[in-house]
Image: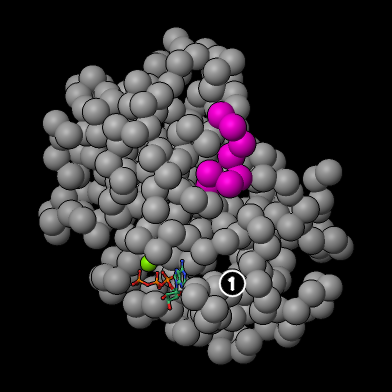
C-alpha cells in the first residue's frame, strides 16, 4: 500500500517529509469556484524550519490543511510521510495524520474544561497507548514546554501563552515528523508570542521535528531558515530555490483536470471555520478500545462551537473520531 515518495529518487537524496507537486485546491461556494491554490509545488524536508508568508487570502491556511492531511487537493500530487494521499481512504488519512503531523493553531483549540495533561494525552488515545503511559508521556511533554507544574490546570484557568504551550505539547506528544503552525503567536501579546516562538524553535532544533509556520510578522519570518512566499494561490518565492522561485512548475497529468469539483472527502471547510479539523489527529474508532475520552469529548454538545472545528476531519476520522472531531456539528 505504501508508495515511494517519488520513484527513481537519486541515491543519497533525502526523502521529503511532505512533497507537493502542482497541487491545487478549488472550493465550490454557492455555485462559484474559488481557486485557493493554483499549482503549488514544494517539499518539506525533515528538520526544516519554514516560514510561510503572503497576503491575507493568498492560500496559506489552505496549503497548511493540505500539507497536514486535513483536506485533500482537487488536483496535483501530495505525498505525506511517503504516502500519496490520493491513494488513501479516510481512516488511513486519519492514521497518517496522527502518526506524522502535529498542528498548532492561532486559537489553540484545546478542550477548555479538560485538564492540560488530558488535552495533551488525547492524540495518544487513538494510538492504543495505555492510560498510564498516556499520562506519563503527556506529563513529560508538558514538562518540556515548561508546564510541568500545570498538569491538572484546565485551559480556562491558564494564560494564552500557557494554553498555546499546551497545544504545542499536544501537537508533539505523538512525536510527529512535521509540526504545522498556522499563526501560532497571532493571539498572543508580543512578549508571550516571542516566548512561544522560541519554544517552537528550540523543539525544532532539539527534536528535529520540521516546523512550518504561517506568520504575518516579517521579523518572525526572518528567523526561519527558509521562507516561502505565496500570492494568489501560488508560491512566488522559496528561499530554498531562489533561482527558480518565480517559475511555475510544469503541469503534471494526474488523470484529471487540475481544477474540478472537490472529491467527496475534500469539501469546503465550514463557512465560519477558520480552522480545519481537530488537531488531535484521531485515527478513528480506537478510543473505545483503550480508554475513556475526556468527559468533554463524550459530551460534545458541551463544547463551544469553535473549540473543535472540524468538518474535514469528521469526514476522515470514522466513527470513533467523529465524536471527537465534530462536537455539536460545528458549522
Ligand atoms: N471553505 C472555503 N470556501 C470557499 N472559499 C474559501 C474557503 N476557505 C478559504 N477560501 C478562500 O480561499 C482563499 C485562500 O484562503 P486561505 O484561508 O487559505 O488564505 P490565507 O492566506 O490563510 O489568509 P489569512 O492570512 O487571512 O489567514 C481565499 O480567497 C478564501 O476566501
Ligand atoms: Mg490563514
Q: Is residue 200 left or right of residue 241?
A: left
Q: Which residues are magenta?
A: 313-320
**Predominant secondary structure in magenta?**
helix
Q: Position of residue 13 (x, y in %)?
A: 73, 60
Q: Quadrant of ligand 2?
A: bottom left
Q: Which residue is mark 1?
A: 25
Which residue occupies the foreground of this view, 101 or 328? 328
Q: Is residue 244 above or below residue 2?
A: below
Q: Residue at x 39, y 16 (%)?
A: 135
Q: Is residue 316 magenta?
A: yes
Quadrant location, the N terminus: top right
Q: Position of residue 73 (x, y in %)?
A: 63, 66
Q: Position of residue 278 (x, y in %)?
A: 44, 43
Q: Residue at x 50, y 74 (%)?
A: 29
Q: Which quadrant holds residue 31? A: bottom right
Residue 63 in sight in this render: yes
Q: Residue at x 49, y 75 (%)?
A: 30
Q: Is residue 132 above or below residue 72?
A: above
Q: Is residue 279 above or below residue 12?
A: above
Q: Is residue 54 magenta?
A: no
Q: Is mark 1 within 8 Å of ligand 1?
A: yes
Amino acid at each position: 500500500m505504501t508508495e515511494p515518495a517519488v520513484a527513481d529518487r537519486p541515491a543519497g537524496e533525502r526523502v521529503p517529509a511532505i512533497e507537493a507537486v502542482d497541487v491545487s485546491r478549488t472550493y465550490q461556494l454557492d455555485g462559484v469556484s474559488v481557486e485557493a491554490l493554483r499549482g503549488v509545488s514544494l517539499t518539506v524536508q525533515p528538520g526544516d524550519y519554514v516560514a510561510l508568508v503572503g497576503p491575507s487570502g493568498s492560500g496559506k491556511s489552505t496549503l497548511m490543511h493540505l500539507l497536514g492531511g486535513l483536506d485533500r487537493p482537487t488536483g496535483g500530487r501530495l505525498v505525506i510521510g511517503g504516502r500519496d494521499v490520493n491513494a488513501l481512504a479516510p481512516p488511513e488519512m486519519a492514521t497518517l495524520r496522527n502518526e506524522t503531523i502535529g498542528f498548532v493553531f492561532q486559537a489553540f483549540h484545546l478542550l477548555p474544561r479538560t485538564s492540560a495533561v488530558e488535552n495533551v494525552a488525547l492524540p495518544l488515545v487513538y494510538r492504543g497507548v495505555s492510560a498510564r503511559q498516556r499520562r506519563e508521556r503527556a506529563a513529560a511533554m508538558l514538562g518540556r514546554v515548561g508546564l510541568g507544574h500545570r498538569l491538572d490546570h484546565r485551559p480556562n484557568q491558564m494564560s494564552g501563552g500557557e494554553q498555546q504551550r499546551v497545544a504545542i505539547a499536544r501537537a508533539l506528544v505523538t512525536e510527529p515528523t512535521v509540526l504545522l503552525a498556522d499563526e501560532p503567536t497571532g493571539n498572543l501579546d508580543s512578549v508571550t508570542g516571542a516566548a512561544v516562538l522560541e519554544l517552537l524553535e528550540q523543539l525544532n532544533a532539539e527534536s528535529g521535528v520540521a516546523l512550518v509556520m504561517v506568520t504575518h510578522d516579517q521579523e518572525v519570518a526572518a528567523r526561519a531558515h527558509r521562507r516561502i512566499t505565496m500570492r494568489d494561490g501560488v508560491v512566488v518565492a522559496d528561499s530554498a530555490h531562489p533561482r527558480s522561485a518565480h517559475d511555475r512548475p510544469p503541469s503534471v497529468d494526474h488523470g484529471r483536470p487540475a481544477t474540478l469539483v472537490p472529491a467527496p472527502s475534500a469539501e469546503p471547510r465550514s463557512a465560519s471555520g477558520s480552522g480545519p479539523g481537530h488537531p488531535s489527529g484521531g485515527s478513528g474508532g480506537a478510543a473505545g478500545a483503550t480508554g475513556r475520552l475526556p468527559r468533554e469529548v463524550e459530551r460534545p454538545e458541551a463544547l463551544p462551537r469553535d473549540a473543535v472545528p472540524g468538518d474535514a476531519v469528521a469526514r476522515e476520522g470514522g466513527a470513533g473520531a467523529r465524536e471527537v472531531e465534530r462536537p455539536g456539528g460545528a458549522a
